[in-house]
Amino acid sequence: MVSLYDSLMAGTAKILLPDAAEQAACAECPIRHQSVCAMCMPDELETLEQLKYYRHYEAGQTIVWSGDEMNFVGSVVRGVATVSHTLQDGRKQMVGLLLPSDFIGRPGRRLSSYDVTAVTDVTLCCFRRKPFEQLISSTPNVAERLLDMSLDELDAAREWMLILGRKTAREKIASFFTILARRAAAGDGSTPPAEAPAGAITIDLPLTREAMADYLGLTLETVSRQISALKNEGLISLEGKRRVRIPALRRLTAESGGGTEDLPAA
Amino acid sequence: MVSLYDSLMAGTAKILLPDAAEQAACAECPIRHQSVCAMCMPDELETLEQLKYYRHYEAGQTIVWSGDEMNFVGSVVRGVATVSHTLQDGRKQMVGLLLPSDFIGRPGRRLSSYDVTAVTDVTLCCFRRKPFEQLISSTPNVAERLLDMSLDELDAAREWMLILGRKTAREKIASFFTILARRAAAGDGSTPPAEAPAGAITIDLPLTREAMADYLGLTLETVSRQISALKNEGLISLEGKRRVRIPALRRLTAESGGGTEDLPAA
DNA sequence: CGCCCGATTGACAGTTGTCAAGGAGCGTGG
DNA sequence: CCACGCTCCTTGACAACTGTCAATCGGGCG
């Protein structure tokens, strides 16, 4: 996840084409044990190795538009991307946040139902869709892992429904920070090194205020106000706009309205 | 916001035990071609046939409590059930609606993360969890079908996030009715026979006002008011409390705020 | 230095939630 | 057969929260 902002809306968005020299061997892949190929045996990995290719996107670039034909699927190797719906009148709702090892695309479906946007520079490990679909039928380990990941995502989506449907703006922000802090403390690599979990925790906000608003179903003004309120009450302090220090996670969590006790993340 | 339980749990809740005489043969099962076993070959069906058993629940009865051990999985054969989260203070958010052919339970997870409640009398076709998990590894057709269903549910959950996060109360109700109407018109068996799709459509509301509120992230009063408003404007008419006539689906859909054009249902 | 974009803050209006008081439908029991 | 009680639903008055519109601030970059 890292410092996304620096690179945020960089410049001209162009897809860097596959560059074989740049592809890591599966055995050394940083997401080897979390991604869709996690359960593969060495011989299965070899098959994947021959099919895979990398794609690169710059921060701010759209990876897929809703309604577009999507002729590949893939895993996020590096970077952060958002998955969102947009209504005709411009209202937008983020419905997923893709971190390293998360899967993009849907076997069995030709057209994308969502906009997928790179928030930072992103590297994808891709497979053409058709061969991948055959793979699913012939490689139970891939199918089983993909099922497991999908069910995790479904759990995460449902947790999010609780936040969207039943929490106040203040609770939404507190929940969001709590989740990020937990993940940072757990050291999943998506955020910079965290302080001792018992003491103060510092998190990098992966998103702009507007993106947070889209995530939480709020306006950017409300997000800003609630962050200011938490700051004024000493529950958090800001280091710059995009870095949050949480002196006592328990106190912040107490403001979150509950229900995030066992969030699977993502 | 709590009293769905209190009220519905009122009657003595007892699980009607398996009754072999009552179990349909898989070949005649009404959900044979939509459920998790949809892709099974005759010999695979036979295996399932030996493992399966039915469970019955009465309307209002809780099928699983959040945090409970869940030692079975199963498909809804008949009836409607809800899947929901509840916060300590009683706020509740429904995160799924289970209709015939939908799957309950999660292979690979012992404890339920949600409350599952029968809204009508419900019949489940169950498998003990452990044997089913083995089945997934050994029967690609089941695993693949389950993956497909999970991805559909994920899509549905994300559509719901859009509704929860970005739509007004009026749009939420209109969206909800539009989805039910589409499904009724498609004749998925979960609602009574629909009229000609081009003309008026009549839908049965499977839920109380309170359950609809929990689904849509509203209060029951707001649900009631918005339904009254739609009625007064002639967009819908009520036949009793639980039956809605939609004279012109297009006009209702126009009030839904969009975004439900290709909902996969469920 | 000045521009631009993101963030903050204020004033105000609108939507939705809260609290409260009935009303309609239905099953039970006198 | 009717009355009673129980849910569920509707409606009203009001308050609170959040969104909208608008002005200002502040940091990074040309």
Image (cartoon, coloured by chain):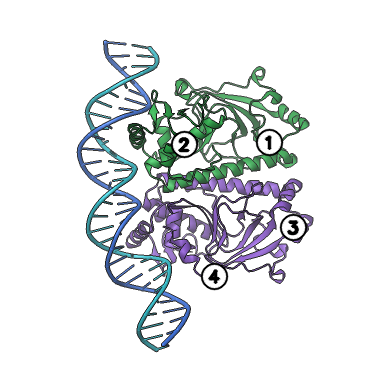
Chain colours: A green, B purple, C blue, D cyan
* 3 and 1 marks in contact (CB < 8 Å): no
Chain holding disc 4: B
Q: Chain of mark 2?
A: A
For label 3, the SS is helix
Q: Quadrant of residue A143?
A: top right
Give the residue at mark 3.
B48
Query: Residue B232: x percent and y percent?
Result: 32, 62
Q: Which mark is residue A178?
A: 2
Q: Is residue B86 above or below residue D18?
A: below
Relative image position of residue A217 (x, y in whole percent): 41, 41
On the image, the x and y values in percent for residue D29 come to: 39, 14
Separation of residues labelled 4 and 2 (CA atoms): 41 Å
- Kindly check if marks 3 and 2 are in contact, taking CB atoms under 8 A apart as contact: no
Give the alpha-carbon distance from disc 1 to disc 4, as whole Å: 51 Å
The span from disc 3 to disc 2 (Cα, nearest Å) is 44 Å
Instruction: Report the mark closest to the observer, 3 or 2.
Output: 2
Rendered residue at 53%/48% (across/down): B156
Q: CA distance from mark 4 to mark 3?
A: 32 Å
Identify the secondary structure beneath mark 2.
helix
Answer with the quarter of the image where residue A51 lies.
top right
